């Protein structure tokens, strides 16, 4: 524990800036995810589930699922 405390207390300014930037970007990412989840709501989830169920048994089911996840990754 002492080694970790010494490392933190003796960091250079570049390392502090890197640690601060990392924490800030992580906080912004988590905030964006929380806002996106609250804005989309549960109604969107039900619509997407119904859309995917429409493809059940279809030869296009796999392609529709992959396309949905790729599009959702960029939203």
Image (cartoon, rainbow, N blue to C red):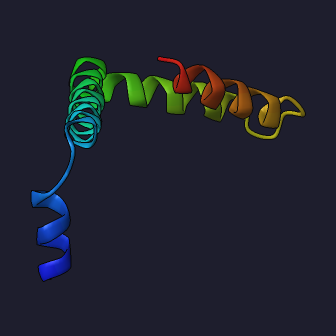
Where does residue 70 sit, x and y in percent of width and height?
65, 26
Q: Quadrant of the N terminus?
A: bottom left
Where does residue 48 sit, x and y in percent of width and height?
51, 26
- Quarter where residue 17 is shown: top left
Question: Residue at left 67%, top 28%?
Answer: 54
Question: Residue at left 73%, top 38%?
Answer: 56
Q: Nearer the viewer, residue 4 or 36?
A: 4
Question: Residue at left 24%, top 26%?
Answer: 28
Where does residue 50 sit, x and y in percent of width and height?
54, 29
Where does residue 41 sit, x and y in percent of width and height?
27, 25
In the current view of this chain or complex, which residue is farthest to the right? 59
Rendered position, 23 above or below 3: above
Q: How many marks?
A: 0
Q: Nearer the viewer, residue 54 or 21?
A: 21
63 sits left or right of 71 in the view: right
53 sits left or right of 60 in the view: left
Q: Nearer the viewer, residue 22 or 67?
A: 22
Rendered position, 29 above or below 23: above
In the current view of this chain or complex, which residue is farthest to the bottom? 1
6 sits left or right of 37 in the view: left
- Quarter where residue 63 is shown: top right
Rendered position, 8 above or below 57: below
Question: Residue at left 27%, top 42%?
Answer: 15
- Quarter where residue 58 is shown: top right
């Amino acid at each position: 524990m002492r080694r970790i405390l010494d490392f933190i207390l003796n960091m250079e300014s570049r390392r502090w800036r890197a640690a601060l930037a990392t924490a800030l970007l992580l906080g912004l990412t988590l905030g964006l995810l929380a806002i996106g989840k609250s804005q989309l709501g549960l109604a969107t989830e039900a619509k997407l589930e119904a859309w995917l169920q429409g493809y059940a048994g279809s030869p296009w089911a796999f392609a529709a699922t992959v396309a949905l996840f790729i599009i959702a990754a960029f939203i």
